[in-house]
């Protein structure tokens, strides 16, 4: 793919005069906190050929300073707006002054009082008028800053009712078949009151509210209403709006109640972080295919790719190739810190310049118009990762560990005896998982292999030993 996408130096020179002032194509995220050298980060962005940054700063004054620094390096600034999960700088005061603003789980516990996965998950209730007013005022204040191109909505969701399967190991959870009530959020009294008024029954009285279609759609709708309030404020100020939802539309809707195709977006950067989901670059392709289909023609679909979530940063080029082959309009990089070496930044710039010139020439790959296969056995790259981890497990290695992505890093230099697999036997199936048993005849070990399915993509797997 790289040979097809990267243009020769001579052709780059010919096309350079044809560039148009289009939306940025290569983005990253940056948070201005004391431990970060912001100007050095901008210098690295310029060195790597990035166009834009989704920047979070603690104050208007910090944004003004950072916008000026970014301008020196040719970087456009979109404000990275933390929405339903307040920024770390605002969170303590909000917890103290407005504990009633925070979301509640199915057990009736407020996230103001209990931890949901991590201490930083302190999400607000989207149904509250006070929360909506707070977010509208925040967006208006940011959009008044000179030099801000637009905003990026982040954390515009509820708390994860389930995690990517590998991440669940960090919390000693197995969320294969049910949504546990302690992680099922959105049960604030204001949410329940609104729902009862509209639908005539209380979801708390159901045996499993997480399976109730109306209750799930209602929670999505509350998040959508909040998102569109902020979109309207930004558009009124003449700013563009993007968002960084979960990896693919169906996945985002189920896991965190983000129905982002219903938001009034100009662009979208779904976070198709392969190292959280399938561990192979083809996930960026499949997620992008799914997202283009979901987004409609008026929204530019980018693809968020990861460089620092446990995998080899060198794989960034394979991930970008996969996204662009599916029709992505651009890439957002999590984050510039993943491009640690000068050599990697240099090669990234060659790639970025090439793709920008392909766009100028109208030669970017178009979305192929095909859906990704929901059958994991059709995906050779995915199955290669699964088989590699079967070999590691058969050899007695742990494949899961408490880490940034829940996986033990693979040593590509290690070799293992070849697998001699029998037939995969389907032993369990629900609306979002398929579980197979398969025996490796070479070792005599039988393994359980689980695939996570959301909508039209495979979005996770697990290998477990059973004998």
Image: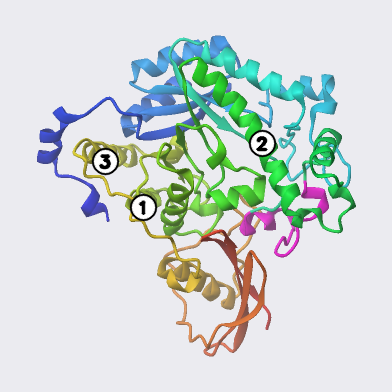
Q: Secondary structure at mark 1?
A: loop
Is 157 positioned to the left or the right of 27 in the image?
Answer: right
Q: Identify the mark at residue 326; answer none if there is no mark.
A: 1
Q: What residue is drawn where x is 29% and y is 38%?
A: 352
Marks 3, 1: nearer the viewer: 1
Q: Which residue is tagged 2?
A: 223
| Among the two numbered marks 3 and 2 on one chain, the one whose residue lies closer to the N terminus | 2
Q: CA distance from mark 1 to mark 2?
A: 28 Å
Tell me how the rendering is colored.
Answer: rainbow
Displayed quadrant of residue 418:
bottom left
Q: Which residues are magenta?
A: 164-184
Q: Residues within 10 Å of mark 3 (few under 14, many from 20)?
A: many
Name the spot of residue 358 as percent of width and height, x first.
22, 41
- Residue 267 is left or right of residue 212, and the answer is left
220 falls in the magenta region: no
Residue sitting nearer the eye, 232 or 146: 232
Residue under the image location 47 percent in, 39 percent down = 269
Residue at image position (43%, 72%) is: 378
In the structure shown, which secondary structural element does the residue marked by tag 2 occupy? helix
As for residue 182 lying within the magenta part, the answer is yes
């Amino acid at each position: 793919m790289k040979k097809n996408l990267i243009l020769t130096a001579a052709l780059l020179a010919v096309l350079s005069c044809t560039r148009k002032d289009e939306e940025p194509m290569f983005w990253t995220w940056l948070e201005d906190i004391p431990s970060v050298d912001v100007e050095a980060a901008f210098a690295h962005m310029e060195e790597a050929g990035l166009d834009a940054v989704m920047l979070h700063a603690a104050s208007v004054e910090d944004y003004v300073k950072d916008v000026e620094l970014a301008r020196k390096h040719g970087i456009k600034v979109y404000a990275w707006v933390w929405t339903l999960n307040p920024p770390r700088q605002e969170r303590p005061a909000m917890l103290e002054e407005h504990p009633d603003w925070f979301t509640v789980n199915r057990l009736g516990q407020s996230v103001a009082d209990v931890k949901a996965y991590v201490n930083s998950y302190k999400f607000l209730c989207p149904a509250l008028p006070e929360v909506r007013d707070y977010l509208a005022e925040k967006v208006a204040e940011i959009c008044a800053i000179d030099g801000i191109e637009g905003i990026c909505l982040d954390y515009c969701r509820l708390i994860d009712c389930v995690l990517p399967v590998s991440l669940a190991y960090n919390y000693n959870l197995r969320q294969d078949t049910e949504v546990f009530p302690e992680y099922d959020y959105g049960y604030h009294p204001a949410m329940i009151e609104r729902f009862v008024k509209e639908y005539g029954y209380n979801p708390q009285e159901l045996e499993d509210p997480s399976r109730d279609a109306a209750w799930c759609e209602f929670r999505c709708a509350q998040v959508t209403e909040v998102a569109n309030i902020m979109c309207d404020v930004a558009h009124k100020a003449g700013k563009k709006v993007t968002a960084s939802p979960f990896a693919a539309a169906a996945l985002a809707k189920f896991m965190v109640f983000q129905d982002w195709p219903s938001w009034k977006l100009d662009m979208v950067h779904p976070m198709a972080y392969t190292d959280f989901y399938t561990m192979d670059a083809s996930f960026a392709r499949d997620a992008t295919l799914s997202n283009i289909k979901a987004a409609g023609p008026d929204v530019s679909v980018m693809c968020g790719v990861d460089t620092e979530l446990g995998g080899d940063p060198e794989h960034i080029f394979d991930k970008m190739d996969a996204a662009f082959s599916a029709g992505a309009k651009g890439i957002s990089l999590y984050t510039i810190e993943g491009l640690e070496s000068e050599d990697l930044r240099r090669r990234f710039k060659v790639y970025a310049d090439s793709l920008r010139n392909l766009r100028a020439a109208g030669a970017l790959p178009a979305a192929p118009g095909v859906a990704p296969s929901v059958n994991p056995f059709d995906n050779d790259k995915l199955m290669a990762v699964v088989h590699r981890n079967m070999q590691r497990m058969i050899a007695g290695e742990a494949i899961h560990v408490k880490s940034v992505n829940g996986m033990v890093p693979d040593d590509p230099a290690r070799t293992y005896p070849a697998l001699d697999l029998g037939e995969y036997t389907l032993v369990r199936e629900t609306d979002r998982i398929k579980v197979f048993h398969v025996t490796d005849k070479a070792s005599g070990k039988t393994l359980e292999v689980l695939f996570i399915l959301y909508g039209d993509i495979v979005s996770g797997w697990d290998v477990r030993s059973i004998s």
